[in-house]
Amino acid sequence: MMMWRDGVVRGLGRAWDGAVELDVEIRGGAPSGASAGTPATPSGGPTETLTTPSGAPAEALTTPSGAPAEAPAPLGAGSRVRALAYPELVGVPAPGDRVTLTTAALARGLGTGGYAMVVALPDRLPADPPPAPGHLVKARYTPLQTMLLGADEQESAHHEVLRDADDLGGMPVVVADLHSALPAVVAGLRTVSPALRVAYVMTDGGALPAWFSRTLAALREAGWLAGSVTVGQAFGGDLEAVSLHSGLLAARLVLGADVAIVAQGPGNLGTGTRWGFSGTVCGDAVNAIATLGGAPVASLRVSGADPRDRHRGVSHHSLTAYGRVALAAADVVVPRFDAGTDLEAALPPGLTERVRAQAATLAAPDGRHRLVEVSTAGLADGLAAAPVRLSTMGRGLDEDPAAFLAAGVAGVHAARLARPAHAQASHAR
């Protein structure tokens, strides 16, 4: 379903690498006879939550119980909406510009981060770019499909490096379900070795443009990441790659990463069913890392505050992806909540035992993985130093410390496994 609106930019909001927020007044496009309204909130209980660029919650994606979905509320003439534009795709908007918007997800209260999305500046289209190499098309066969230079394609300066590449050289790669785990994993890495070069490999299960993530922009600006690689249909990273496999190789061989982190962009999608969630790719990632001679490190999605039982302790997303999809063995990092800080004190009674019991199903005799218990010592300060606000499913560090401690210990373990890429290259010589 598409809902189109015409609007006029009334003001500019925040801007970060690749994106700008706009205040837009709707001028037209609402159905005949519709009046201005506010975004509707669908009925029913929440399943998953899609997120804003910072990792804060957007509206909950809901599944009505046996009832048809509520009709979207119209956004009629005179309504003011927050919109998001990607200048690389549509040009640089300015106050007074007319904009063409899509508003269906906003009207339904779904997870575009509370945004109408700018499709075009119809009266001021950007000039054609100069001729340049690159023929990877991403977001293929959508109106905003974009052509990019892939690190692995023939026109790339990195093609020769990647053409026959087949080995990550034991590089540890942390796999995480949610984008909100990214800063916590890096924080954990930095408690062991701040000098490690860390690359983020963004899969296409959530947002396709990496530009949507303020978290990614802030981590880059703070020097916490050496770079990012967008794979599959995702785009906008420092490097583009066709597949997760070539993206991992680009992270190691082009960005010179000592450690990589694989996670989807903002916008986790789930339906409250065993298999209907975008995080199944975590199991695929474990397989890819192992195939390429890397060291898969499985970060558990843990919560002590989620009201949904299937996500309490270890989420069923982690248990399904690692337990059923992953066909290769990984180090599954289990937090040992023993640091004695306010974060551990805030955990609900019985959480430690629950997490251990759930994680045990992933190892022998029932599973194939190796369980690695890692202390949360040092993580309170490491997480507090993050250059972005930590938020997962609408809950911050103080509200759900287990989520970030669990991601952080995966980073700690990966850092202990890491052999710097430059040292390995010297040894090979």
Image: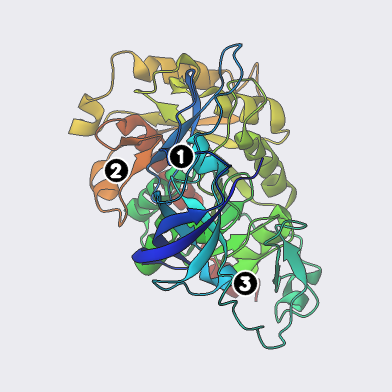
Three-letter amino acid code at the position of disc 3 = Val
Residue 297 vertical position relative to residue 183 in the rendered view, above or below: above
Label 1: state its secondary structure.
Answer: loop
Disc 3 crowd rating (10 Å Cα; few below 14, some 14-19, many 20+) is some
Q: Does residue 142 appear to the left or right of 50 in the view shown? A: right
Q: Quadrant location of the N terminus? A: top right
Of the image marks 3 and 1, the number of the one nearer the N terminus:
1
Cα separation, mark 3 vs mark 2, equals: 30 Å
Camera-nearest residue between 316 and 169: 316
Pointer 2 and pointer 1: residues touching (CB < 8 Å)?
Answer: no
Of the image marks 2 and 1, the number of the one nearer the N terminus:
1
Residue labelled with disc 3: 254
Tag on residue 35? 1
Residue 128 vertical position relative to residue 411 in the rendered view, above or below: below
Which residue is located at x 58 percent, y 42 percent?
31
Camera-nearest residue between 213 and 112: 112
Cα separation, mark 3 vs mark 1, equals: 54 Å
Three-letter amino acid code at the position of disc 1 = Ser
* Residue 139 % position (x, y): 70, 57
Residue labelled with disc 2: 379
Can see residue 45? yes
Label 3: state its secondary structure.
Answer: loop
* Residue 259 % position (x, y): 52, 57
Camera-nearest residue between 404 and 381: 404
Label 2: state its secondary structure.
Answer: helix
